[in-house]
Image (tube, rainbow, N blue to C red):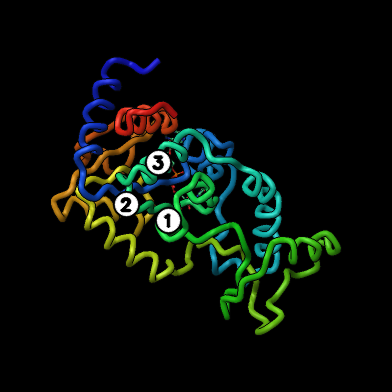
Amino acid sequence: MVAPKLQEQIEELAALVRSSCYLVAFSGAGISTESGIPDFRGPQGVWTRMRPIELQEFLQDPAARREYWRRKIESWPQMRDAQPNAGHRALARLFEAGYLKTMITQNIDGLHQKAGICEEKVIELHGSNAYIACLQCGRRVEWETILPFFREHPEPSVDCPRCAECGGWLKPATISFGQAMPEEQTRAAFIEAGKADLLLTVGTSLQVHPAAGIPGETLGHGGKLAIINNQQTGLDGQAHFLLRGSAGVILTEIAERVTGSSL
Ligand code: NAD
């Protein structure tokens, strides 16, 4: 049951989505918590439990490198097997119906693509956890190629695997703190946000830069900003619409009103 004030906001936002010319959505970890993947800064966030390992530590300290891989291997089956939830499905519905033009995400879980938004229309700002990449030459390596190494060498004294081509360190293809953002994707995200007459941000605390600068591109070009999140965000004061609650519930209600069909 959606509270009356929220219901009113949903009606208003759905009308704006319907009349929008260039709708862009921007998601963060919060959209995937309903698929069982914890976020970083929410109440059950990963960082309330452990500190992130930065790129420099990964490169310089064998113990940090081993710990980084341990965490990644521990969470890999959950991310590999996760399924899109109502929020991902609602955005995919808006995409199929021609309203959503581009999906920008900070997420590394691939759930927008799994929900049906085509690969070329999803901009992954922080990389992808779906595969491993060499930090030096960028060569792609599959998880199944790497996992046996760790199964055969559980001893913490054994260092992590290197690229068979150039000897660089292998790491899941996600962007760590201290690691440069992918240039092409970052540029594309800012361009798309600038074109948007309406930007829907969903499940992001809007605290991580440069990603948190994306709504400013929309606002700077005269577009409107809608924030859907269950807690306060860094940009609440600048939003035209502020919808507090579950991303899955709110996005479903919006997509149903916009498309006229139930999800
Ligand atoms: P964040 O953890 O900083 O913020 C998530 C926000 O979503 C919080 O404000 C939280 O209260 C809210 N939230 C949680 N569940 C929600 C729900 N069901 N409905 C509505 N709101 C909900 O995440 P961020 O802003 O994306 O930034 C952190 C970084 O974490 C990103 O760089 C991202 O790459 C990475 N990350 C990704 C995943 C993933 O791929 N699923 C998971 C964890 C972290």
Mark 2 or mark 1: which comes first in sequence? 2
Report crowding for label 1: few under 14, some 14 to 19, many 20 or more residues within 10 A (C-alpha): many
> On residue 42, which mark appears?
none
What residue is rendered at 61% in x and 76% in y? 139
**Residue lying farthest to the right in this orientation:** 152
Q: Position of residue 130 (x, y in %)?
A: 60, 58
Residue identifier under label 2: 101
Residue 170 in sight from this viewpoint: yes
* Label 2 neighbour load within 10 Å: few <14, some 14-19, many 20+: some
Q: What residue type is disc 3 on?
A: Leu
Q: Secondary structure at mark 1?
A: strand
Residue at position x 38%, y 28% from top?
A: 261
- What's the CA distance linking mark 2 and mark 1? 10 Å
Answer with left or right where residue 149 lies relative to residue 33: right
Q: Work out how far the residue at label 3 is from the one at label 2, CA to CA, in angstroms.
A: 10 Å
- The residue located at (73%, 71%) in the rendering is 161
Q: Quadrant of residue 145?
A: bottom right
> Which secondary structure lies at badge 2?
strand
Q: Is mark 1 within 8 Å of ligand 1?
A: no
User: What's the amino acid at mark 2?
Assistant: Lys
Question: Could you say which disc has been placed on residue 122 in the image?
Answer: 1
Is disc 3 placed on a helix, strand or loop? helix
- Residue of label 3: 91
Looking at marks 3 and 2 on the same chain, the residue that comes earlier in the sequence is marked by 3
Q: Quadrant of residue 5?
A: top left
Residue 240, given in percent of the width and then of the height, sits at: 19, 37
Q: Quadrant of residue 132?
A: bottom right
Instruction: State the residue in front, 61 or 97.
Output: 97
